[in-house]
Every structure is written in structure tokens, then in C-alpha cells.
């Protein structure tokens, strides 16, 4: 996960960015409004694998099994954070030391840079944007130039691969209004020509372009309004008072 350059907090499972007097949901929290059917099957698979690994399962193992998807997710998140931090240090010329876990990912990254010769212009920047009355914020991984074109790219290390909603994520960053610096200063968002994902795994890598089309922001806008419906009290206020009630005189069963 890219480290934000402004203060964040957590509320109801969402990441909130604090910018001046505003509290803005993160892009990834907004994308959490999307149904992710694949996660249900993934979680079931992880529970099944944990049960096989355990061998004999008893009632006392219930919580251990139930939490197995969270353990797998957390381990993957630790590796992802390590790889992101390592790549940022490499492209910004900081400490080049690489932990053993990150070495195969860095090898794929080096193959990517050797093939495309990108110029890294900005890395790990926090942005904010507005759609109508609502704002959002997020942090992108890298802004690069390849053969005269400006790319906004995201690094992914997930075992499951690249999912279509990453295009929404990158489009939201690309259509943001401002880049926010740690000292509170800001600049206009830089122009973006193309969107891409660099997917890195220990044994292979892919650089995939995500289609940069206007309808992406239309879809993101709908999700942003849905997030506010769920998190700004609108959903709780949707149901009015009970006007009448009763009990059935005779039940069918």
C-alpha cells in the first residue's frame, strides 16, 4: 500500500484522508462499494486449505478456521508493503538494501525497467479530487514517462492477478484535482496519457495497460455517491416510522 502524505484515519472499515477541514474517503474505500464475488470463493478456498493443513479439525478450531482468510490477506499485505517500499527506495535513489523476500519481485521490476526504460517523475504521491459535492483522496505509486507519453501506474503483487476495478482506481487518481505534499502545499494534478499496472510475482511479471475511457469516471462517481449513502447517515435515515403493524390471526404452519 502506498503511504499517504497527509493524515489518515479509519472509520467503519474505510480509510479517511484529512485535508484542511475536509474528511475524504480513500479511492480504495470507494471501490469497496463494488461487489467482489471472487472474494467469497477465495475465502472459502483458504478455509478449506487451512482445514486440510490442520488435518483433524474439532469444534475448538472454529475461530482458527474462520480467521484463515484474514491471516493469508495480512501476510500478503506485509509482502506487498515491503515490495512497494523497496521499489520506492530504488527509484528515488535511497538505501538500495533489499530484503530476501523482495529479491524476486525486484528482479521482475528490473526486467520491466530494462525493457521500457521509464523515466520516474513522481512516486507515492497523494491526490485529492472532487465530483460534484463530494471529494475523494488516494495515493498513486508512480508517474512515469515512456517514449514521450505520461503513464500513471500501480504496482500490484496480489496472487490473484489484476482485476478490472484497478482501471477505476487509476482513473480516479488521474482525474484528481491536486497533488498534496507533506508540508501541506499542493500543485495541480499532472497530465496523464495512459494507465498501467505492473504486476509482480516471485516467478513472473506483467505490465498491463488499463483502458483510459470517460465512462470509468462515470462509474466511479456512482460508487462515490454510494459510499456517501452508506457512510454519511443517508442509509440510516432512509426508513421512516412504522405507521401500522399487527399479527396474523392464523399462521399457515
Image: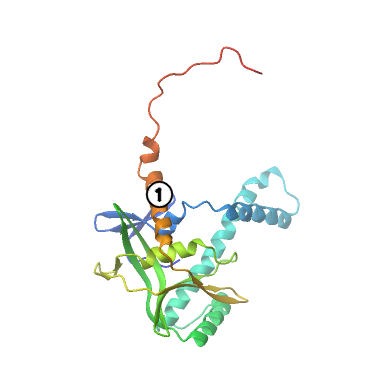
Query: Horizontal and vertical percent for residue 191?
Result: 33, 74
Q: Which image quarter is the N terminus in?
A: bottom left
Query: Horizontal and vertical percent for residue 150?
Result: 39, 78
- The residue shown at (40%, 57%) is 218
| Circle 1 SS class | helix
Residue most extreme to the front: 214
Query: Horizontal and vertical percent for residue 77?
Result: 52, 64
- The residue shown at (46%, 51%) is 33
Q: Quadrant of residue 159?
A: bottom right
Residue most extreme to the top: 249
Direction from residue 65 to residue 186 in the image, left or right: left
Question: Vertical placement of 239 versus 233: above or below?
Answer: above
Question: Vertical placement of 146 versus 214: above or below?
Answer: below
Question: Vertical placement of 136 versus 196: above or below?
Answer: above
Direction from residue 50 to residue 213 in the image, left or right: left
Q: Which image quarter is the C terminus in?
A: top right
Query: Horizontal and vertical percent for residue 249?
Result: 57, 12
Quickly name the residue at label 1: 227
- Residue 37 or 89: which is nearer the viewer? 37
- The residue shown at (37%, 68%) is 174
Amino acid at each position: 500500500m502506498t503511504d499517504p502524505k497527509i493524515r489518515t484515519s479509519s472509520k467503519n472499515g474505510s480509510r479517511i484522508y484529512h485535508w484542511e477541514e475536509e474528511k475524504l474517503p480513500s479511492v480504495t474505500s470507494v471501490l469497496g462499494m463494488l461487489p467482489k464475488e471472487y472474494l467469497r470463493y477465495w475465502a472459502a478456498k483458504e478455509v478449506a486449505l487451512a482445514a486440510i493443513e490442520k488435518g483433524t479439525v474439532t469444534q475448538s478450531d472454529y475461530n482458527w478456521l474462520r480467521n484463515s482468510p484474514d491471516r493469508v490477506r495480512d501476510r500478503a499485505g506485509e509482502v506487498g508493503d515491503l515490495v512497494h517500499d523497496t521499489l520506492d527506495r530504488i527509484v528515488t535513489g535511497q538505501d538500495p538494501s533489499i530484503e530476501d523476500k523482495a529479491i524476486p519481485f525486484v528482479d521482475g521490476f528490473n526486467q520491466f525497467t530494462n525493457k521500457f526504460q521509464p523515466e520516474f517523475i513522481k512516486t507515492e504521491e497523494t491526490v485529492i479530487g472532487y465530483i460534484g459535492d463530494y471529494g475523494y483522496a488516494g495515493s498513486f505509486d508512480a508517474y512515469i514517462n515512456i517514449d514521450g507519453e505520461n503513464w500513471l501506474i500501480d504496482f500490484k503483487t496480489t496472487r490473484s492477478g489484476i482485476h478490472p476495478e484497478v482501471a477505476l482506481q487509476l482513473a480516479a487518481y488521474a482525474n484528481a484535482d491536486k497533488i498534496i505534499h507533506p508540508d501541506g502545499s499542493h500543485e495541480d494534478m499532472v497530465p496523464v496519457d495512459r494507465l498501467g499496472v505492473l504486476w509482480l510475482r516471485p516467478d513472473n511479471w506483467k505490465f498491463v495497460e488499463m483502458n483510459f475511457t470517460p465512462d470509468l469516471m462515470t462509474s466511479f462517481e456512482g460508487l462515490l455517491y454510494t459510499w456517501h449513502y452508506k457512510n454519511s447517515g443517508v442509509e440510516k435515515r432512509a426508513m421512516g416510522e412504522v405507521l401500522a403493524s399487527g399479527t396474523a390471526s392464523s399462521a399457515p404452519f
